[in-house]
Amino acid sequence: QKEVEQNSGPLSVPEGAIASLNCTYSDRGSQSFFWYRQYSGKSPELIMFIYSNGDKEDGRFTAQLNKASQYVSLLIRDSQPSDSATYLCAVLNTGGFKTIFGAGTRLFVKA
Amino acid sequence: DTGVSQDPRHKITKRGQNVTFRCDPISEHNRLYWYRQTLGQGPEFLTYFQNEAQLEKSRLLSDRFSAERPKGSFSTLEIQRTEQGDSAMYLCASSLVAGGLFDEQFFGPGTRLTVL
């Protein structure tokens, strides 16, 4: 079992729709969870961070965390073509010393 | 530019040669990370430093890989006796961690290594 698992996609949604990206993790003691966006040929950049169960909203982005199910998700509302990228789920392991990245989900937003 | 910088951006080498990469983190950041990324995969953790101390090294990393961060500033990653399987993008990231649960990592542009 991979430490952080994501559906590789690609996920294709029409412009204006909601994109839903999912992630599961194996380290039950993990405390912090991150979503990074990586455009093709570029480096990852942080877009969301969550450490409490429930939802966290920031503009068009909502991160959801369910520690009991070891599940993290990212919702992108009103998806734009500029949102087309790979979204990486990252988990800070127990002890807070190492961040483990998933393989990423490729998102395509069709104009 | 006050972001994370890496040098060189591209490196082509022959199998068996040694290569060294440099990373300059954001100046006030105390943590520095090295990752390796191949096509279609997320960044794979290699090692990280808290100031000048190397606190963890991936079990997947062979003894051919070594990293240093003298004086807690820039860092170097050396790969000895390169193999074709070492071909990848090597990413450096830095962060300012003062305890707690938040660790926003800022990534450099990466060094793309091609081993012929």
Image: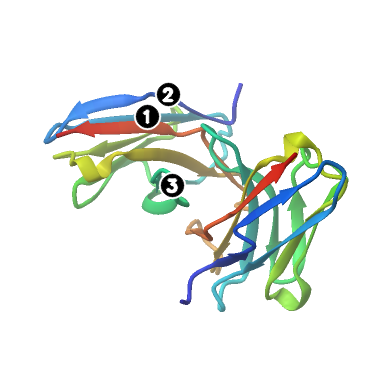
Q: CA distance from mark 2 to mark 1?
A: 7 Å
Q: How is the image coloured?
A: rainbow
Q: CA distance from mark 3 to mark 2?
A: 16 Å
Instruction: Look at label 2 and name its amino acid.
Output: Asn
Instruction: Look at label 1 and name its amino acid.
Output: Asn
In the image, which disc is placed on residue A22? Answer: 1
Q: Position of residue A94 (x, y in %)?
A: 61, 44
Residue at position x 75%, y 78% from top?
A: B71
User: Mark 2 or mark 1, which has the lower sequence index?
Assistant: 2
Q: Position of residue B103 (x, y in %)?
A: 51, 58
User: The residue marked by circle 2 belongs to what chain?
Assistant: A
Mark 2 vs mark 1, foreground winner is 2
- Seen from this angle, which residue lies furthest top? A1
Left or right position of A21 against B33: left
User: The residue marked by circle 1 belongs to what chain?
Assistant: A
Residue A82 or residue B25, whichever sits in front: A82
Mark 2 = which residue? A7
Left or right position of A107 against B76: left
User: Mark 3 or mark 2, which has the lower sequence index?
Assistant: 2
Left or right position of B50 against A61: right
User: Mark 1 or mark 3, which has the lower sequence index?
Assistant: 1
Instruction: Look at label 3 and name its amino acid.
Output: Phe
Residue at position x 55%, y 33% from top?
A: A28
In the image, which disc is placed on residue A34? Answer: 3
Q: Does A88 sit above or below residue A96?
A: above
Q: Does B111 sit above or below residue B27?
A: above
**Badge 1 element:** strand
